Image (spheres, rainbow, N blue to C red):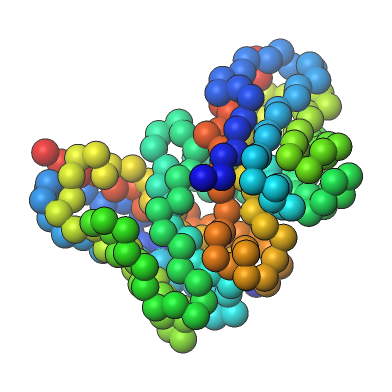
Amino acid sequence: DVKVTQSSRYLVKRTGEKVFLECVQDMDHENMFWYRQDPGLGLRLIYFSYDVKMKEKGDIPEGYSVSREKKERFSLILESASTNQTSMYLCASSYLSGQPTSAHGYTFGSGTRLTVV
Amino acid sequence: KQEVTQIPAALSVPEGENLVLNCSFTDSAIYNLQWFRQDPGKGLTSLLLIQSSQREQTSGRLNASLDKSSGRSTLYIAASQPGDSATYLCAVLPGAQKLVFGQGTRLTINP
């Protein structure tokens, strides 16, 4: 089974800190994604990457950056954490396109609950 | 732009009932449709995936159907149990590699 592992379940950070959220997948997926989930707003895509060192903005990239130095690892960076970034962060991965993606879909990690105080 | 709608937003039923969750989408050009389950404070667990060429998929007490022409999918849960209580999310994969999610149905099974 594909596993997507997020390094922390819970994080508490102070306003202004630089925060790193780490995600690792073990199935050689090309695509990796970062979402945030807030009550009433659903899942919103922050950034995604379809290859090493490649990244594309999602729907809400402001205040975030990402890094993908290795295929299996995708990091989300909050450059200067703010209280409005308190949220559940979810990482996901999938094959690039075509039949593998069609047949296997997305796999999600268990989430990181980030609180910024 | 693809939009996914799930109705109802919340559902509460007694244990043992069979139930149906609904999902509709606006553009029939999809690679697949996935149903996910999310427990409070947890990540998403994939339940069933239906490829665009398929009509339904089954796993245990769960059955998901897909009708692309009408832009609808249903998730059928047989003989519901309290452990089925969770939020169920429907998502479609259009050609752009990015899933489009519905807002979810929060299901409560009462003992």
- The answer to whether one can see residue A20 in this image is yes
Q: Position of residue A16 (x, y in %)?
A: 79, 17
Q: Please tell me which residue lies in front, A28 or A76.
A: A28
* In-image side of A101 versus B38 (left or right): right
B107 is higher (above) or lower (below) than A68:
below
Quadrant where the C terminus of chain A sits is top right
Q: Is residue A117 left or right of residue B54?
A: right
Answer with the quarter of the image where residue B18 lies: bottom left
- The x and y percentages for residue A90 are 60, 38
Q: Is residue A15 above or below residue A104?
A: above
Residue at image position (85%, 46%) is A52
Q: Residue at 18% x, 44% y: name it.
A: B81
Give the image location of residue B23, x and y in percent: 41, 66
Q: Residue B42 location in percent, x, y?
A: 46, 34
Counting every numbered tag in the picture gives: 0
Q: Residue at x 62, y 30 (%)?
A: A6
Instruction: Tell me where residue A74 sits by quadrant.
Output: top right
